[in-house]
Image (spheres, rainbow, N blue to C red):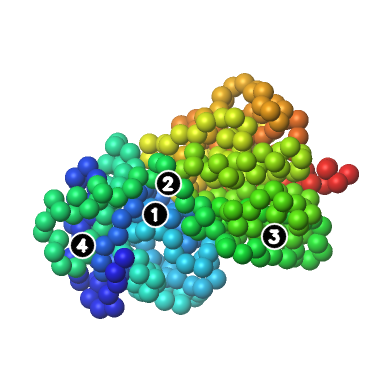
């Protein structure tokens, strides 16, 4: 990516999809060029959490909400130490940010971190295009030399696909760090960072858990060196079919029957560890308004999602696995995609969505309590 410190709001820009469709608008954030997979997010709030979610690595996010940036940017809400999206697409950027916590505007933050974006395009038309044809490679170009769309299209089509991408190690911590329990320490959890969001260990810390966050390359020996009461596998970017290392580590955890919880990428890792396949969704689930049913209680939750892959497991039967019986515990009510798995003969479960969602909704926060209950039962 290249950046400019002047004139971004007036610079012409064009978004070019790999199938040749183009949208012209104005630069938003940095001026230059960027590439990634075009996806859309349906959240009307929480854009700062979206931008800093490591799971969006190498993705260009199209915001379906028409107005973005209204509340500006602060230094308290990021989910990681940087913006991870490859590019950002909005229709009407806020001209003035207005919030008592705002410290700078969103476009200033995008420019500061070198994130190339585009504004002033018909994001509704772009979203419908992606819904009909699926997520695809895209480029955003701003500044000079935008007339030759054929040359820009060739650049887009030369980019790697998301399918087959192994990305978790690129976003994970390089060194282990500890998030202390808030109040009395009750448990120790080893969390494998595949792209973890900052709110995840915080939600566990609120429940008296000391969280040791380990790199994506952590081994079973690394996990058990911290003497954990439970093991957690985080969200993260890329194709789960490439994650052979984390799958093998999770299988070692399952062999020892340690209480286990996985979120998002961690759900896909559990699926693979149990012997199920994974597949790429046409356009994925992204946003904070996805209805999911918890089949263990029958309750419906409104949930936050960010995933382009899913587990291929049977919805209506119990499956035999090398680690005991398994079943689908949660399902998306929009399209019947698997949204959770659980083992029936040992303490392990996972969900495909984000119960830690800082910007909400918080319907699924009980899942952290369910993890605590598993560790309590194992200790008893």
Mark 2 nearby-residue class (10 Å; few <14, some 14–19, many ≥20): some
What's the residue at 64%, 28% (across, down)?
A: 327
Residue 55 in the image, given as x and y percentages of width and height: 48, 53
Which of the pair 259/274 is nearer the observer?
A: 274
Snapshot quadrant of residue 227:
bottom right
Q: CA distance from mark 3 to mark 1?
A: 27 Å
Location of residue 152 (image quadrant): bottom left
Task: Please indicate, yes or no, whether residue 359 appears anywhere in the rendered image.
Answer: no
> Which residue lies under the disc numbered 4?
13
How many residues crowd around disc 4 within 10 Å: few (fewer than 14), some, or many (20 or more)?
Answer: many
Which quadrant of the rendered structure holds the C terminus?
top right
Q: Which residue is mark 3?
A: 212
The tag earlier along the polypeptide, 2 or 3, is 2
Foreground of the two, 328 or 141: 141
Label of residue 165 in the image = 2
N-terminal of the two: label 3 or label 4? 4
Dot placed on the residue nearer the N-terminal end, 4 or 1: 4
Instruction: Please identify, in this view, whether the residue under mark 2 or under mark 1 is nearer the observer.
Output: 2
Mark 3 touches mark 4? (CB < 8 Å):
no
Residue at position x 67%, y 38% in the image? 251
Tag 2, which secondary structure?
loop
Which mark is drawn over residue 58?
1
User: Which mark is drawn over residue 17?
Assistant: none
Instruction: State how far apart marks 4 and 1 are (Cα).
Output: 20 Å
User: Which of pointers 3 and 4 indicates the residue nearer the eye?
Assistant: 3
Q: Nearer the viewer, mark 2 or mark 3?
A: 2
Between discs 3 and 1, the one toward the N terminus: 1
Q: Is residue 262 left or right of residue 57?
A: right
């Amino acid at each position: 990516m290249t950046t400019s410190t002047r004139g971004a709001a007036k610079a012409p820009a064009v978004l070019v999809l790999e199938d040749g469709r183009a949208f012209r608008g104005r630069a938003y954030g940095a001026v230059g060029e960027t590439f990634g997979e075009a996806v859309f997010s349906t959240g009307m709030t929480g854009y700062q959490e979206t931008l800093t979610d490591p799971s969006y690595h190498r993705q260009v996010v199209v915001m379906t909400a028409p107005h973005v940036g209204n509340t500006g940017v602060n230094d308290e809400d990021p989910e990681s130490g940087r913006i991870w999206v490859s590019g950002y697409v909005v229709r009407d950027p806020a001209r003035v940010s207005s919030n008592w916590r705002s410290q700078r505007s969103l476009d200033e933050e995008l420019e500061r971190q070198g994130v190339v974006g585009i504004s002033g395009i018909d994001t509704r038309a772009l979203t419908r295009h992606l819904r009909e044809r699926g997520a695809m490679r895209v480029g955003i170009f701003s500044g000079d030399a935008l007339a030759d769309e054929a040359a820009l299209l060739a650049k887009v089509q030369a980019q790697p696909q998301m399918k087959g991408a192994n990305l978790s190690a690129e976003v994970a911590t390089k060194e282990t760090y500890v998030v202390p329990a808030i109040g009395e320490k009750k448990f120790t959890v080893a969390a494998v960072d595949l792209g973890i969001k900052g709110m995840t260990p915080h939600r566990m810390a609120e429940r008296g858990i000391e969280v040791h966050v380990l790199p994506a390359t952590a081994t079973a020996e690394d996990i058990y060196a911290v003497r954990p009461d439970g093991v957690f596998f985080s969200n993260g970017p890329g194709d789960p079919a490439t994650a052979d290392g984390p799958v093998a580590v999770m299988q070692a955890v399952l062999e020892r029957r340690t209480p286990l919880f996985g979120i998002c990428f961690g759900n896909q890792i559990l699926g693979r560890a149990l012997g199920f396949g994974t597949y790429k969704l046409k356009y994925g689930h992204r946003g904070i308004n996805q209805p999911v049913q918890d089949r263990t209680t029958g309750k419906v939750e409104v949930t936050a999602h960010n995933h382009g892959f899913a587990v291929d497991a049977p919805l209506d039967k119990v499956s035999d696995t090398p680690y005991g019986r398994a079943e689908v515990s949660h399902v998306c009510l929009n399209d019947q995609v698997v949204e959770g798995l659980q083992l029936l003969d040992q303490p392990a479960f996972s969900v495909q969505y984000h119960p830690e969602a800082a910007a909400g909704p918080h319907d699924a926060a009980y899942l952290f309590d369910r993890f605590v209950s598993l560790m309590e039962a194992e200790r008893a």
